[in-house]
Image (cartoon, rainbow, N blue to C red):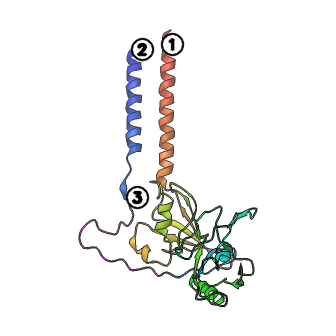
Amino acid sequence: MRQNFTERRNIYLLLFLFLTLFSSCASTKNTKYFQDIPDSGRLNTISKASFTEPKIQNDDILTVVIQTVDPQASAMINSGNVSTTTNNAASSVMPALSASSLSFPTPNLNNPAGYLVDKEGTITIPVLGKIKVTGLTTTEARELIRTTADKFYNNPSVTVRYANFKVNVGGEVLKPGSYIMPNEKVSVLDAITMAGDLTIYGKRENVLLIRENLDGTRTPYRINLKRSDFMSSPYFYLKQNDYIYVEPGKGKAAATDMAQARNYTIAGSILSIIAIILTRK
């Protein structure tokens, strides 16, 4: 009886060690980015991806700052960059920005600060009135607002930025969620970095990018992070409301099954020990 127990215990112990060691080993082949770039030798230059300024859409929120010689003259416009909650239930007025130093509110997903583009495609700015900005870039909107402000102020300087340039990252990343970007020139790598990078189980060769079109439809694209040429593709730079989804690979299912098998082995060993103890009494 004692010999059988010892042999059984050794078998369970070896099986447990094998499963533990096997599950802790992960090949870098499936987790490495840009595998077509050699580890040594002369490296080729990667072509630059074309960047197109995004167009302002309805429901975007824009931070508009006007600087003049007299900061008090444009204080009303700058304080109009109110913080709007997602349910429009509350708002708070931002402090006026001085002409001596240009600063912007810290982007906040739940409480972005700025002027909301309404369903008619316009923003309503104190003193200046309604200005239609839908379909314009921030550069074009800045020039339009500056031309309008020039009627009321002497040589105004205007800055326009997105306050809710949002991208979404989900699936096999460390921190899935929605992220407000600090500027409008944002790449896939920027978004993945903000999400804490992919887990070891994420499929790097088949990342899904879903892009929202102006008419409300959505178009899917596939991105291969194992190849460097995607950094030259038209999908390298993101647009508002883009969604990045990282699919889980087969390794995650295998790791889950292995963890369950390890738990079953441990439970079986404990039950065997308990059974032997009870039979010896």
Q: Which residues are magenta?
A: 34-51
Which amino acid type corresponds to the residue marked 1 in the rendered image? Thr
SS under mark 2: loop
Identify the residue shown where x is 68% and y is 75%.
76
In the image as oriented, which residue stretches furthest toward the top?
281
Q: Main secondary structure of the magenta part?
A: loop
Q: Which residue is mark 3?
A: 30
Query: Where in the figure is residue 93, as x and y percent of width and height?
Result: 68, 66
Q: Which residue is mark 2?
A: 1
Q: Which residue is mark 1?
A: 279
Query: Where in the figure is residue 82, as x and y percent of width and height?
Result: 68, 69
Q: Does residue 155 sit above or below 274 in this rendering?
A: below
SS under mark 3: helix
Identify the residue shown where x is 47% and y is 32%.
265
Tell me the distance, in whole angstroms, between the alpha carbons under discs 3 and 1: 49 Å
Query: Where in the figure is residue 96, as x and y percent of width and height?
Result: 63, 71
Sequence-first disc among 3 and 2: 2
Please rate how many residues cluster around mark 1, counting C-alpha atoms within 10 Å: few if below 14, some from 14 to 19, many from 20.
Answer: few
Query: Where in the figure is residue 39, as x and y percent of width and height?
Result: 28, 65
Please state if 3 lies on the left or on the right of 138 as rendered.
left
